[in-house]
Amino acid sequence: MEEQTKHMNNELREAFQKLKKPVPGSDFTANVMNSIEEEAPVSQIAYTPLFNRTVWTVLAAIVIVLLVLTIWMGSSTDSVFSGFLSEMNQGQLMNVFSTINGKIIRILSSSVIMLSLIAVLAAGMINMLIFQRIDQAG
Amino acid sequence: MKQEDDNFYIRQVLAGDVQAFSRLVDRHKEMVFTIAIGLLSVREEAEEASQDAFVKAYRALNAFKKESKFSTWLYRIVYNECITRLRKRKNGYQSLDDNIAMDESFLLTEEKENRDERAALMHKALGDLPEEDRALIMMYYFEGAGIDEISEISSLSLSNVKTRLFRIRKKLYDKLQLKIEALI
C-alpha cells in the first residue's frame, strides 16, 4: 500500500514537472506598485492591543465565571460575593487566606465595582472579537 | 547581494519606503499566482485577484502581527480573495454547472509541438478538478508547500488537508492511468 502511494506520488510529481509552472505577466510587479503608489502610505505606528489574545481569553473566562456566579448565587448583585464569602468561610482554604480575603471580598462585593469589572472585561472580549474578524478578513 | 528576510522589507515599508514592497511582491508573486490560477482558472482574473491581494496586504501591513510567517499571511489573503470571487461568480452571472476552461498558458512547454502527452492529460485532469482541490494540489506540487502551510492558508484542518490531498492524487493518478491505457 505504502509502496503504491509512493509510486503514485512519484508519477504525479513527474507529470507536474512537465507542466509549465503558472507565472504572472512580466509587468505584474509594476502594476501592483502603481496601484500601491496611488494609496496613502501605510502608517508606521502599528496598533498594538493592550493585552495579547491569551490574556483576553483568561479575562473572558473570568467574566463568564462572574456572570455564572451572579446568576447562580441570587438576583441581587450585592449579595453575590457576600453569599460566596459565607460559603467559602466554611472551607479550610478560608483560614489560610482569611486576612486578605476579607478586604478583597469587601471591595468585590460592591455592585458598582463588580459591574464596572464586568463592563471592562466585556469590552475586552469585544475588542478581541473585532481583531479576530479583521484577521479573518485581512 | 544579501537576501534580507521579509520582516526587513516590512520594516522598510512601514518606515515610509514604499518601493521596498516591490521586493515582497517579487518574492511571493509566483505562489500567490499559483493559488489564484488554481482557484479561478482564468489568467486575467487570477492576475487581478493576485494584484488585489497584494494591495490588501499593503494596506493591512501595520496590522500584521508576525504571529505567522508573512508569506502564509499573504497567501491566506489571496486564498480568501479568490474564494470570495468564486462565490460571487457562482451566485452571479455563471451557474454552478458552468465549467470554466482552464488557462492554456501553463500547458508545459512553450512550443505546442513539444507538448508531452502525459502532461496534456494532466492538464485536462487538473481542469476537471473542483477549484479548491486544484489549488491544494498545485500548491503541493508546483510550489512544494507542506501540509502544515496548506492547512494554514486554506483554513482546513491538517487531517482534512491530508485526506483531501490523498484523494486528489488518487483521482489524478487514476485518470492518467486510464487515459494512458486507452492511448496504448
Image (tube, coloured by chain):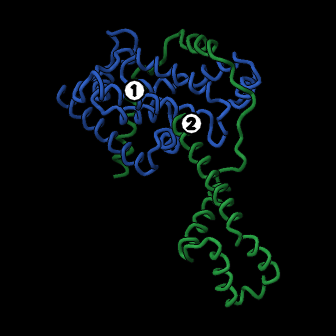
Label 2 and label 1: CA atoms lie apart by: 20 Å
The numbered mark 2 sits on a residue in which chain? B
Q: Nearer the viewer, residue A9 or A31?
A: A31
Image coordinates for residue A129, horizontal then vertical, percent? 56, 47
Residue B19 x, y percent position in the rendering: 69, 15
Between residue B183 and residue A91, name the one nearer to us: A91
Q: Measuring 71% from the left and 32% from the top, which residue is drawn there? A: B7
Q: Colour of chain B?
A: blue
Q: How many residues crowd mark 1 within 10 Å: few (<14), some (14–19), many (20+)?
A: some
Q: Where is residue A118 in the image (x, y as percent from the top left)?
A: 64, 60
Residue that numbered label 1 is attached to: B85
Q: What residue type is labelled 1?
A: Arg
Q: Mark 2 points at which residue?
A: B72
Question: Could you tell me which quadrant the N terminus of chain B lies in?
Answer: top right
Which chain gets the green colouring? Answer: A
- Visible residue check, residue B9: no
In the rendered structure, the answer to whether residue B4 lies left or right of residue B85 reads right
Between disc 2 and disc 1, the foreground one is 1
Q: Which residue is drawn at 62% across and 25% down?
A: B59
Crowd rating for badge 2 (residues with CA inside 10 Å; few <14, some 14–19, many 20+)? some
